[in-house]
Image: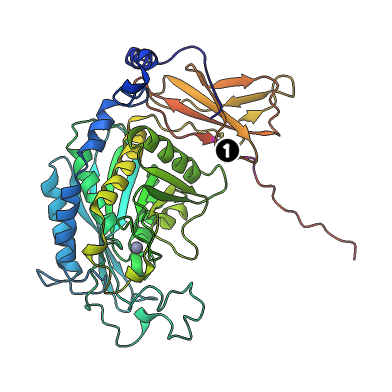
Amino acid sequence: MRSTRSIGSVQSIAFRLAMAAWLVLPPAAWAQAPRPDADPRIEKIVASISEARLKSLLEKLVSFGTRNTLSDQTSPTKGIGAARNWILEEMRRSSEHLRVNFDTHQIAPQGRITSAVDLRNVVAILPGKSPRRIYVSGHYDTVNIGGQNVSNSATPGAAAAGGDRQTRPGFDPNVEANGANDDGSGTVLTMELARAFAESGVQFDATLVFVTWAGEEQGLVGSNVHAEDLKKANVPVEAVFNNDIVGNSLGGNGIRDAESIKVYAIGPEDSPARSLARHIRKTAGVYVPSHRVRLMAREDRFGRGSDQSSFSQNGFPAVVFREANENFERQHGENDKIDGVDFGYLAQNARVNAAGVATLALAPPAPKVTTDRGGNMLSRDPSGYDATMRWNASPGAVAYRIYWRDTWTNDWEHSQTIGNVTQFTLKNLNIDDFVFGVSAISADGQESMVSGYVSPVRAGTTIKRQQ
Ligand SMILES: [Zn+2]
């Protein structure tokens, strides 16, 4: 951001004191000084993420041998049935504040689901003051198709090599598939965040939902039916933090990167998913400053996907976290073992998630910047060459912050904090030349995601020609 102007102060006294301390301290003391934007409640949650617990959870998770969606459901020690029972019980044990249940679906044979299956996502809910929901997720199912590159549909020549392994006669879903990193890493990250948030003692405004999905490896099956049910029931899902392959720091190319994490967000530029991604990078900068968030202006990696797409397809803002440098040789095969997981790195990625989730869960919802009929709330009033933004009041907001930037730029360049109003005019800023947005701020200084004013895509018309 190049400029930050502040008029009509809305900052709390604590914030002003922190800011004052910040300004008078000598440079050497800066590292120990409270960061002006940091909330001690969130710092505590971030600090409570345990590397040791992530490790012990994953050690147990891989002990089930395979968690293939079509594997054994009756053995008490092996296969997906034993694994999901343990995830459910472990999340119940981790906090009495969590409501933990199976989200069960009977899935008919189709595609890679080669026989009818009882599919169960494991869902842990931490009720908030409001019904608006924020999701954290990873998929607990695994697959062994003999290595990533054998039958990846995005790989040229896959068909020639024998097509999709999972649909071939004789494919054995009970063969060992540890899935330590894909996606044991995202599974234990989700479980650890559930514990950290539920045991924090903080009362959040948003309801937090921690889910481990099944059926991801057969085509996002578990998340697909879950997101479809949410849409049908009109459940307000404001953000989805999906984590898939987030625990390995040593790439197959020999390069180690334990200092950054990628966040993929589907467009267009000012989609809610992109806004969520920017929010995650901003809060990571405050609470996990040693870890770099690399934003990716894509739905996911090239030709590959995960459960966030089930949410995007149903109209919910969703992103996916991916480790900085993957080892493709250790995916979808017998090499995806626990020795390939860097728990210090996984813990940092969990902390980045935690910072983004906690800030959003304490902040008001992002302002709605369209009318009930979907109309635009940005206009040229009053001169014709000014920018007037209007928005719907956000419950719990005591102030708003407006943002603007050049249209050919991805990141907000300017912002201004304003009072508790639902309209603001920037003089002499032509709405043709800039992108505008607005966020909502709570009494304790927590800021929502930024809602962007998106220029609608013009519908095409078919011109009748004279015959
Ligand atoms: Zn995966």
Give percent across and percent down for residue 461. Answer: 75, 54
Q: Three-letter amino acid code at disc 1?
A: Arg
- 381 w.r.t. 359: above or below: above
Query: Where does residue 350 sit, x and y in percent of width and height?
Result: 29, 46
| Quadrant in which residue 95 is drawn | top left
In this view, the residue in front, 19 or 84, is 19
Q: Residue at x 33, y 73 (%)?
A: 108
Position of residue 227 relative to residue 292, above or below, is below
Describe residue 381's horizontal placement relative to residue 81 as left or right. right
Residue 437 against residue 298 in the figure, above or below: above
Residue most extreme to the right:
466
What residue sits right under mark 1 in the picture?
373
Please tell me whether the stretch drawn in magenta is mainly helix, strand or loop. loop
SS at badge 1: loop
Quarter that holds the C terminus: bottom right
Work out whether residue 386 can be spotted.
Answer: yes
Residue 209: % across, % down: 28, 45
For ligand 1, give the image quadrant.
Answer: bottom left
In the displayed structure, does residue 374 sit left or right of residue 229? right
Task: Give the residues drawn in magenta, as a range.
Answer: 452-456
Crowding at mark 1 (Cα within 10 Å: few <14, some 14-19, many 20+): few
Q: Nearer the viewer, residue 380 or 77?
A: 77
